[in-house]
Image (spheres, coloured by chain):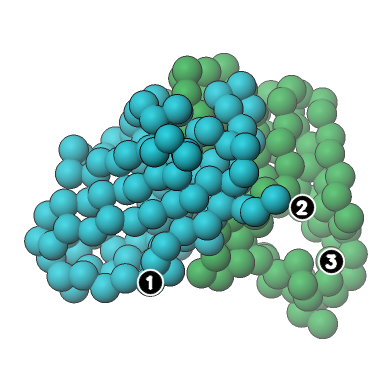
Amino acid sequence: ETGVTQSPTHLIKTRGQQVTLRCSSQSGHNTVSWYQQALGQGPQFIFQYYREEENGRGNFPPRFSGLQFPNYSSELNVNALELDDSALYLCASSPGLQQETQYFGPGTRLLVL
Amino acid sequence: EDQVTQSPEALRLQEGESSSLNCSYTVSGLRGLFWYRQDPGKGPEFLFTLYSAGEEKEKERLKATLTKKESFLHITAPKPEDSATYLCAVQGNTGFQKLVFGTGTRLLVSP
């Protein structure tokens, strides 16, 4: 059984650019959540996808958007990057909405210059 | 709004010196309280889920307990490899699986 994987591991972008981060869920998991973790802080919830539909959203602007594919992999897209978007972006999957425990991937470290 | 406060922010222990980490929370209807371990630059690693007051769970040198207002992570006879940041999170009755995290406790265990 493979765990949650994310790509790329590191990324450097400049302000105003767009970025796409990718996540493959753990085998058998159909729910994916994305979190942003700034240095020295706990992860902050961005949004969640369940069976290809957005199921909930945190306090992030619309320039943060996502997709979930039929194989339950997922993408996080961020448009018009700002310096404050520099963070570790974490993807977490779970077996379904009734299974609360989420398992995290290793994250993508994004640096915006 | 759901909120989690962890203390202390940082803790330094000698190998074998037992201690406890605290997680205080406010949540509208607790669905679960979660403990994760996070090593520098890596994703959080799941440790425990607690669902109701009075519940306890153990794994090796770690034991998590839960009351109606707080949770404790007890570390017995820690080893240097237990050094990490320990994150606490709650999930309330929002209808979806949103975890609200604290800022974590950075634990350093010296040999």
The residue wearing badge 3 is B78
Q: Nearer the viewer, residue A32 or B34?
A: A32
Query: In the rendered structure, the residue with mark 3 lies on which chain?
Result: B
Query: In the rendered structure, the residue with mark 1 lies on which chain?
Result: A
The hue of chain B in the figure is: green
x, y percent for residue A111: 28, 70
The residue sitting at the front extreme is A70
Which amino acid type is marked by label 1?
Answer: His
Q: Residue at x 15, y 70 (%)?
A: A14
Badge 1 element:
strand
The residue wearing badge 1 is A10
Which amino acid type is marked by label 3?
Answer: Pro
Task: Specify whether residue A3 is in view.
Answer: yes
Query: In the rendered structure, the residue with mark 2 lies on which chain?
Result: B
The residue wearing badge 2 is B20
x, y percent for residue B12: 70, 71
x, y percent for residue A10: 38, 71
Question: Is residue B93 placed above or below A49 in the rendered structure?
Answer: above
